[in-house]
Image: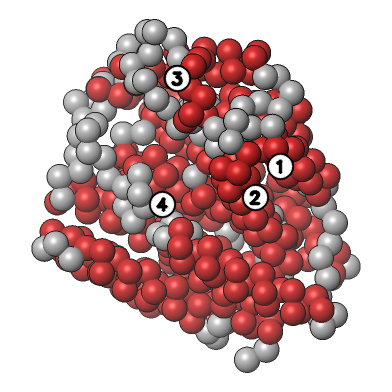
Amino acid sequence: MTLERAQLGLLAALAATIPVSIFASQALLSLSLAVLAARVAARRTRLVRTPLDTPLLALVVWTLLAACFAQDPVASHEYSKKLLLYALFYLAVEVLSREEDRERVLAAALLGGLALAGLMAAQWLFLGYDDLSRRPPGFLGHYMSASGVAMAILVLATARLAFSPGPRPRPVGFSLPLLVLAGVGTVAAATAAGHGTLAARLFVAALAALAAAVALSTREAARATSSALPWLAAPVAAWALVASQTRSAWIGALLGLGVIAVLRAPRLLWLIGGATLAVLVLRPAALTPRLTIEDDSSRDRYYMWQAGIDMILDKPVFGQGPGMILVSYPRYRWPEATHPRQPHLHNNLLQVAAERGLPGLAFFLWWVAAAFLAALREARARAASGSRWAAAGALAAVAAVFGAGLFEYNLGDSEVLMLFLLLTALPFALRLGRAATA
């Protein structure tokens, strides 16, 4: 097997495991980066510069500086090792620049998202994860992480359905997605029998192998699976998102779907707006507890945001330090706050500013704005291209993640961050691929 094919198989396996396992996806990231380094050393590829390089470098450097001034510099630097995940962006730009490879890797991401959403739905239906005190986490450790990933998968699958040209998928293309859902059902049954951990680990290993095999399979087999996946991933992810009862993810999903509507057919905005208004007016019983801002969770967010502002005013340059919100929060907590301790501030902007100061926030906003504008330009440039769905999906995903991040520190979740990095690489990969064929 050539290094290039090994790279493709590893990245596909990585994309598939992001929604189901931090350990597996990060182990595969390490292997993928080792292969990329070998290819660069052998001069079989090279890393290209992107408009995100400067803001990302500035954000990384300032984060490490902020850790030096933290209350516990050692713990803060330990927390900052998550910065290594940003290497995924450069790996993805290189691999996804080739159209067939891009389709296969994105299909792998949808396959993993289908598995996550399928288990969330099964947990909600059969395993008692059906109220606010016990919400479905899927394969992940927390329902917030699961809902953030399900949101991004819903947006990506919808973009594939809205923009991808070609005929309806053939029945054979549904074989692998249905096999994955059968595996999810087995995991759910094993969980009910008390053997969920072992079943989940075996499933993750099998999923990684399947994703790699599909990525390295024949063109016909890969295309059949790729075209069929969104038809299952979109509705199952939507179902999982509703079951999660996570309002921040709902808001992000609406923003992402709104972006797709504007790009595809602006009249669809009326449909999205009408559906949202109908839910607010009719207030379905299953959703009523979440259609309010008077609950304890909403009130606690208000007071933790006030504490976050106080943290920023107290240390506006370097902040409290990465990973230091948990130990700093009791000193700034408002008496009206519901919970005495908080690991984060449920807002990406406040979190970054409180941890890394106002310069860190400026670098973060620079990075996100550059990623959004690159996706917007590419979506417009590809108006008549079969690859437009990838650019549209990237743009919608950035909007969804950033919108949800106004009410949740979702980029603090490794799973959401890795999927976000993979998708923000798409516009630059598309541009690189276009330049290579010019």
* Pointer 4 with pointer 1, Cβ within 8 A: no
Tags 4 and 2 touching, CB below 8 Å = no
The residue to which callout 2 is attached is: 83
Work out whether mark 1 precedes mark 3 in sequence or the reverse, and give the earlier one. Answer: 1
Disc number placed over residue 192 in the picture, else none: none
Q: Nearer the viewer, mark 2 or mark 3?
A: 3
Q: Which residue is mark 3?
A: 330
Q: Where, quadrant-wise, is the N terminus in this rendering?
A: bottom right
Element type at mark 3: helix
- Position of 404 with respect to 353 (left or right) is left
Q: Which residue is mark 4?
A: 234
Residue at (31, 47) in percent of width and height: 137
User: Is residue 240 shown left or right of residue 423?
Assistant: left
Q: Are the residues tagged 2 and 3 within 8 Å (C-beta)?
A: no
User: In terms of image quadrants, where is residue 435?
Assistant: bottom right
Mark 2 or mark 4, which is nearer the start of the sequence? 2
Image label count: 4
